[in-house]
Image: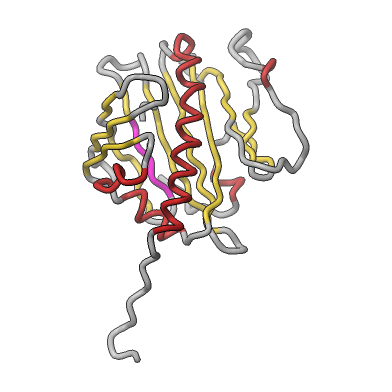
Amino acid sequence: MHPGAPAPPGRADRAVPANTELCGTVLRAKEPRHGNRGIGNPGNENRGDEEPRRPRSRGSEERTRRGTPMREIATVVDIAATPGHVWRILTDLERYGEWNPFIREASGTVSPGGRLRLRLFPAGRRPVTFRPKVTVAAPAQELRWLGRTLLPGLFTGEHRFVLTDLDGGGTRVVQSERFFGVLVPFLRRSIAATAADFEALNQALKKRAGTVPERRAEPAAGSL
């Protein structure tokens, strides 16, 4: 995870990246149709039913218009809490260590242009520290940051949390990341393994939202 102007999210299928197809609560990657021979991953594609039972993560790999390798992973979780409540948990960086199994240490400014310091603990791998830049911070809608290596073009990651208010109550969280750079083809296994870390974060976020009381709206001045 290298773990970034938002349109207000509407339906869940509008909240996911353009090259990712949302089937029920499953994200299934579309393989590129033209060019990129040998880059896609058709052998692992899961056709499945039209309405899968549980959210599962998927990845896709293609090339940008400039020919830079790109790979994407995405995961989904539905949480029985309001988008505002989920947003407050995601942006309360100082408390990440209390619930987040993946990003256990976090600090910085959650606003466009702000810098974060994130200490990641991927399962089975060494901890790593990133200092990404926040590019989108739309309360109760989207949090996005962008991180890159020292040398431009080698490895860049754009991480997103997109929150959608479900009609029946609750929030759908789509956590995704797009990886760019010449090192992407050589890091396919590491990138694919990151999906499990995303899933762990999602489930921990869901649990946290259920154990921390939601903040009630304060009454307007003069009201009873």
Occupied quadrant, residue 76 = top right
Say which residue appears at 33% left-offset and 90% top-offset. 223
Given residues 66 and 111, the one toward you in this image is 111
Which sits in the foreground, 137 or 199?
A: 199
* Residue 121 placement (x, y as % from top left): 34, 28
Is residue 30 toward the left or the right of residue 160 in the image?
Answer: right
Q: Say left or right for 70 vs 91.
A: right
* Left or right of 208, for residue 57: right
Please state which of residues 103 and 99 is positioned toward the viewer in this rendering. Answer: 99
Using the image, determine if residue 191 lies above or below residue 139.
above
Task: Judge whether 62 appears above or below 73 on screen.
Answer: above
Q: Report the side of 140 relative to 44 (left or right).
A: left
Instruction: Quadrant for the N terminus, please.
Output: top left
Image location (x, y in percent) of residue 64: 50, 20
- Please say which color scheme the image uses: secondary structure
Name the chief secondary structure element in magenta: strand
On the image, the x and y values in percent for residue 202 come to 48, 42
Total count of labels: 0
Image quadrant for the C terminus? bottom left
For the point 60% across and 53% down, the residue is 11
- The vertical placement of 160 against 194, above or below, is below
Magenta stretch bounds = 142-146
Q: Nearer the viewer, residue 140 or 195?
A: 195
Q: Which residue is drawn at the image coordinates 52% and 29% (left, top)? A: 73
Q: Is residue 183 covered in magenta? A: no
